[in-house]
Amino acid sequence: MSATPTKTRTASTRSPSTRKTGVRELAAQTTRDNILKAATKVFARYGYEGGSVEKISKAAKSFDRMIYYYFGSKEGLFIEVLEEIYRRMNDAESKLNLDVDNPGEALQAVIRFVVGYYRKHPEFVTLLNTENLHKGKHISKSMRAREYSSPAIEVIRRVLESGQAQGAFRQDVSARDVYLLIAATGYFYMSNRHTLSAFLGENLEAPEALAHWESFVIDSVLRTVAPGPSLPQGQTARRA
C-alpha cells in the first residue's frame, strides 16, 4: 500500500493575517509620509501659526485625528518637518563626490552645493525663517538637530585639513567658521532676495545674478582660507 502524500506549505505562502499586517503597515507609513509632505508645504506657505491642522489634513487628504495619532501635536509635526528638511539636505550632501586631495576644488564643490541647495529648495529657507521668528523654540526640542549639523562641518574639516597639510590653506581657520561663512552668504541672499531686489532695483533671482553671487561667494571663501599674514599677537582664531 502506498503512503498518502502529505501536503506541505511552501516557504513563499503566508497566512492571510500576515499579509494584512504588511498592508496595514504600508498604509500607515504612506499616510504618515503624506501628512509630513503636506505639512512641509503648508508651513512653508502659511508659517507655523497659519499652518493649521485643518489645512494640513486637507492637503494630505487625511483627517485631523491622524496628525495627532502619528505626531502627537501640531508642534510635534512641525519639529519633524524641520528634522526632515535637515535630513534631506544631509542626504544630498552625502552624495557629493569630493576629492580632498584637491582641496581647492573640493571646497568649491561644497560651496556650490550649499548655495545651490538654498536656491533649489526655497521651502528650506522659508521654514528656517519661520523657526527663527520663534527663536528656535521648536528645533531646540529636537533630539536630532545636532546630528544634522555635524556632518556638514565634518566635510569642511576634512577639506581644510587636506589644504592645510598641503600648505594651500591657512592654519588658523576653523571648519565651524568656514561653514558659517558659506551658510550665511548663501542663506541671506535667498532669504532676503525679494526685499533686496526691490532695494537694489534688480532681479536677484535672474540666472546671471545667481551665477554672479555663487562666483562671489566662492572667491570670498577661497580668499578667506588662503595663506596670509598671521593674526595679531595675542589673538587666535576659534578652532572647531
Image: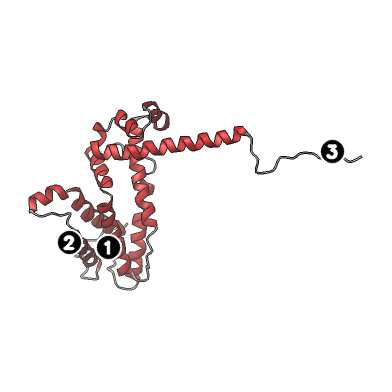
The numbered disc on residue 78 is: none
Of the two numbered discs 3 and 1 in the rendering, the one whose residue sits closer to the viewer: 3
> How far apart, in angstroms, are the residues tagged by discs 1 and 2?
31 Å
- Please report contact status of discs 3 and 2: CB closer than 8 Å, yes or no: no
- Residue 206 vs residue 154, the one in the foreground: 206
> How far apart, in angstroms, are the residues tagged by discs 3 and 1?
82 Å
Q: Where does the image place residue 168, in percent across and percent down from the top left?
A: 29, 72
SS type, badge 2: helix
Residue under label 1, please give it: 173
Left or right of residue 237: residue 151: right
Left or right of residue 211: residue 85: right
Q: Where does the image place residue 19, in percent across and percent down from the top left?
A: 58, 36
Tell me which amino acid carries mark 1: Val
- Residue 92 vs residue 180, the one in the foreground: 92
Residue under label 3, please give it: 4
Q: Where does the image place residue 110, in percent across and percent down from the top left?
A: 31, 61
Left or right of residue 182: residue 146: right
SS type, badge 1: loop
Residue under label 2, please give it: 208
